[in-house]
Amino acid sequence: MSGKRILLSMLGGVGMAHAAEFNFQPPASPVAHQIYDLHTLLLLITVTIFVVVFGVMFYAILRHRKSLGRQAKLFHENITVEIIWTVIPFLILVGMAWPATRAVLAQKGSRAEEMTIKITGYQWKWRYDYLDDGIGFMSHLATPAEAQRGAAAKGAHYLLEVDEPLVVPTGKKVRLLLTANDVIHSWWVPALGVKQDAVPGFVRDTWFQADRPGVYRGQCAELCGKDHGYMPIVVDARSPQDYAIWLAARKKLAAASADDPNKVWALADLKARGEKVYQQNCVACHQASGKGIPGAFPALDGSPMVTKDKPAHIDIVLNGSKKNPAMAAWGKQLSDTDIAAVITYERNAWGNHTGEVVQPKDIKAARGGKA
Amino acid sequence: MAISTTAGHAPHEHGKPAGLWRWLAATNHKDIGSMYLWFAFIMFLSGGVMALGIRAELFQPGLQFWQPELFNQLTTLHGLVMVFGAIMPAFTGLANWLLPLMIGAPDMAFARMNNWSFWLLPPAALLLLISFFVPGGAASAGWTLYAPLSTQMGMGMDLTIFAIHILGVSSIMGSINIIVTILNLRAPGMTMMKMPMFAWASLITAYLIIAVMPVLAGVVTMVLTDRHFGTHFFNAAGGGDPVMYQHIFWFFGHPEVYIMALPAFGIVSHIIPTFSRKPLFGYTSMVYATSSIAVLSFMVWAHHMFTTGMPATAQLFFMYATMLIAVPTGVKVFNWIGTMWQGAMSFETPMLFAVGFVCLFTVGGLSGVTLSVAAVDIQLQDTYYVVAHFHYVLVAGALFSLFAAIYYWFPKMTGKMYSEPLGKFHFWWSMIWFNVTFFPMHFLGLAGMPRRIPDYALQFTDFNLVASVGAFCFGLGQLIFLYNMLRSIRRGEPAPHKPWEGAETLEWQIPTPAPYHSFVEAPHVEAGENGVIRSLTGGAHH
């Protein structure tokens, strides 16, 4: 393989050092290796065709010119030649189709999985549920907005970093079940050779198996609205031992942080938690300042709904907006405590000083009223 | 020969109407053709300005100029404007201008419908452009308008849907006109298999348009009713299927690709023989290749959807069918090279653009073969590799062939010569900066940059910078073209009756500039292959 790669780099006129910029990312799963080799084969074939065909054409362009005193030969048909140049490309295609078919069948073979993860696309974040172990979490972009606006330095993984990566064991066949909450998203990790659309209302499946430990980065690959560019995917592949340690810790954390829906919270605690929820879920549209984006997303700071009409406020956060579909129904994504916290935060942040506390049981009651 | 070669300024029995009314009520195929071409050029510049907006934002990582919402609106409208506002009307305009002259007809078959099919375009364009200024902004779901994202948008989406309806009606009317003109108004002696290639390409394209534009109209109407009338065509919660949108859209969208490519094939099949001073090689196989591309184009739509999760059997079928298109397309390229082989070539501007077309279109074709392989497409779908691929096919394909056509027929249309040095400069400038803009996008896609993102990770910085510089230079270069055209129309050298030594089709037999009314009486032509005129009798042009 490496001979071919060196040849490819030379074709691109560059040294090996920059290969990653000119070609696929280094493959790290069986399917990704297969895709890499197949693409290399296709590239060699197409570059050869290009050189041969254009060799002939440029020979004609250079030699068969009027300015060289050529007289045109007026032939305009040759059945033999035409049959040859129909059949040969056809045979080349048959030659390509054979390895291509094998690769397609390998990609589609998601059976005999050793673990299953359900992936749900949201505008604009991913949720991962480990179906065998009963844990699940959201994964958000971790690059701060200041870096995007040029107010802070951009780190090495600018826009490709998340707060909670998908952690998987190496050497295990991981089956992915994909769906989406709102619009179509596409889960893509180049090094693992996976790209699969997540379609709302349907479940699709695909699989990968990481060869070696490492952090593999990708992005949503289907236009899914305004923050489509801010939906990175990070897969952290660990050795089975390290994975087991992570899993145990994660399960313990999940048990510890499960909220009691009947707990009565103090304003300050709820507001602090609500700020975090707001930063993860609301800030993209309504902005950190609560001012929204005029014409597109309403301001929360000073809004009558947020300062006065509490039932309407709870309703729109739980069930979304009838008028503006961009306002999602958060009741499906967030727990009662998180929703209570974010509403409490919004009613007490910026210039809003209602002093009101919305408790988790209020949300539970509001949900009951709707169901 | 009854055709006078000096009659351009002879008295007209029914002359042209004067003033604004000449254009508003135009029924003359040349006037309407000119309006189409100017309209397309204005839209080309508008769509180009949007593209430069995109490239300005992508010049470096971070958000500099636009919010992500506006960035998405720019990418969406850039696509829609270029496809429906620039490329398609430009080809219809050329067909209007040239078909009657090429086949010896007095005008298009339905002259008044022709007026309508043009005048539907400006209101549709206005709807698209004013949608930027309505609450919520223009459509921002990409030119494909995938549901359910498109059901989320504000009223800009409704304006876009209406604009598509109007544009669709216009192009269907234009197509009916082209088909009827070609089938019924050919001069005696010009049989189907003796028609010029551009007539064949326009005929087949027109059939494609009639077949698929109603499909597009249907699918956007379904989006409209999902948005406002409570239907659930694309909402799984109501029993619909979001992926069905993609199937219907691409059943239109894939033939649409060939609607923008086949006329280009026709144009190049005129220009290469002319400047090679040889007949087109393999006329018959060109006709059959064009037809089989058109037929195959209906069977490959789902190759745009390899990542939606279709079963392996479907992936394999669409992969094989897609790969197969390379065969007739290859035949066409080989025929063009066969035409050049042992010719006596000269390289005036139209020939430069035609040869540039062949080179770059082939690059786009070869990256298309790579994309056809479903297993590899999984990595490349929705990346900049695809953006590179279709710009090689659409800019270097459709746009370069349009430039070639304008330079080639400009003398016949206006009676003036364009400036050859400016034309050559325009070609080389466009050729260089086109490649600087789009070739690095192959690398961006391979390395993993998704398309339609307003901001990107740092490893994509260098190539984006190169592409943005290229785009601005390419865009600037198109002003050279505009200047050359305006300058030449006003004070260009008078063009000779037949400016190109090797041009042999019927339109070169009439005076220069082409008179307002040509072929009032049908000429009797004795045509050889590819519309090359062997002899000609009769055919008063006014």
Image (cartoon, coloured by chain):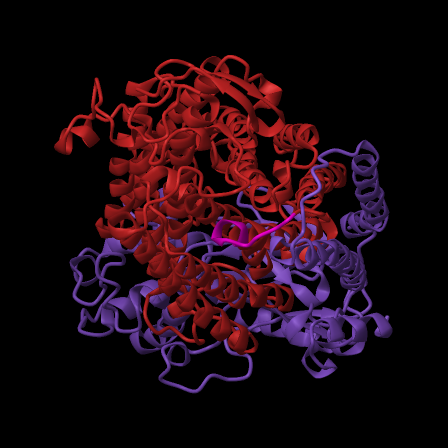
Chain colours: A purple, B red
Residue placed at 54% from the left, 73% from the top?
B463
Left or right: residue A84 compared with residue B35: right
Residue placed at 18% from the left, 29% from the top?
B22
| Quarter of the figure that contains the C terminus of chain B | top left
Where's residue A301, x and y in %?
20, 67
| Quarter of the figure that contains the N terminus of chain B | top left
* Region of the chain picked out in magenta, as a range: B344-352
Q: Is residue A326 visible?
A: yes
Query: Is residue A186 in the magenta section?
Result: no
| Residue A242, image quadrant | bottom right
The foreground one among A107 and B65 is B65
Where's residue B342, x and y in %?
71, 47
View extreme (bottom): residue = A153
Left or right: residue B380 compared with residue B511: right
Left or right: residue A321 compared with residue B536: left
Residue B216 to residue A89: above or below: above
Where's residue B178, x and y in %?
44, 23
